[in-house]
Image: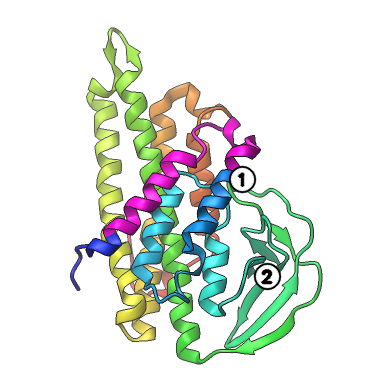
Amino acid sequence: MDARLTPEQAALRQAAARLADTLGPHSVLALADSERVVQLEQAITGSGWRSLRSDGAGGVEIALVAEELARGLVDVPFLGPVLADALRPAGPGLTLAVGPTAIDARGATRALALDGTRLLTAPLGPPADGVDLTRVAAPLAGPYEPAGEISAAHATRWQALAISVTAAEMVGAARGAHALAVGYARVREQYGATIGSYQAVAHLLAESLALIEGSESILRYAAWAVDELRPAEAIRSARIAKVYCAQAARTVCETAIQVHGGIGNTWECLAHLFLRRVLACAETFPVRLEEIEVGLP
């Protein structure tokens, strides 16, 4: 495995980063800015990223986009549509169902689900808010209906992709939370000095950075494995990445809240949005240690 990004992959990552930095919510109040959301939706639709898999992209490319969008708290659908597209290429209005709930349901009318090797589809009910304030969920409004079948190998690779992409979102959210905390530590002063100059704070931020770098390494391997290793090995790599990234990202986000001090526990501070995203992603295709046959600290 070559861990370096190709020029095309680097350009894709930069494009996703620019979009997230330009149109992502930079405050909690911005979540209610309908004009911004419309512009963001148009940009994501125009990018074609929701059909990356059916357009021939690999797990690495999809994970790179997911990571950058989560870093910028992009609050229009990507995860649900791109995973639905990986199961069966379809037009707009389709997202992914996980259990009785569809994720990324903003603008969707139907959800696609995988049961073994069978594809199922169902209509959606009215959207509802969940833990993750940047993502709209919706309950299913009717029973599942058959929508085709895929091979066992395709199903296993898709599961590896789904787990890896949710891990990528957690890494992206951790990066966003860490950047937020570093920016705050540079300007917040106590006793005549910025709090980032104190070792107690600097060490916390350094430890968070080490967790992020470790998460990126294990994630990159899992995303590469989706297409390059045998299906069973790919899903095992994805599960290991999910367990590691979930623990690391939660620690980083909680550290970001701690660095902010009292303001970190207020509604106006963006830090809780990153934590919410991590917690929601951890419970989307959750993985237990028993499933990967190794112990992780």
Residue occupying image coordinates x 37% and y 73%: 58
Mark 2 element type: strand
> Crowdedness of circle 1 by 10 Å Cα count: few (<14), some, many (20+)?
few
Write down the residue under mark 1: 38
Spot the residue most to the front.
46
Spot the residue most to the right.
142
Write down the residue under mark 2: 111
- Tell me which numbered mark, 1 or 2, is placed earlier along the sequence: 1
* Residue 293 visible in this rendered orientation of the protein: no
Q: Is residue 138 left or right of residue 266?
A: right
Which quarter of the rendering shows the C terminus? bottom left
Residue 26 lies in the magenta-colored region: yes
Amino acid carrying mark 2 in the image: Ala
Residue occupying image coordinates x 33% and y 13%: 189
> Percent from the top left, x then y, of residue 105?
66, 59
Q: Is residue 103 left or right of residue 253?
A: right
Residue 1 lies in the magenta-colored region: no
Quarter of the image where one finds residue 150: bottom right
In the foreground, 241 or 293: 241
Question: Is 95 located above or below residue 33 in the figure?
Answer: below
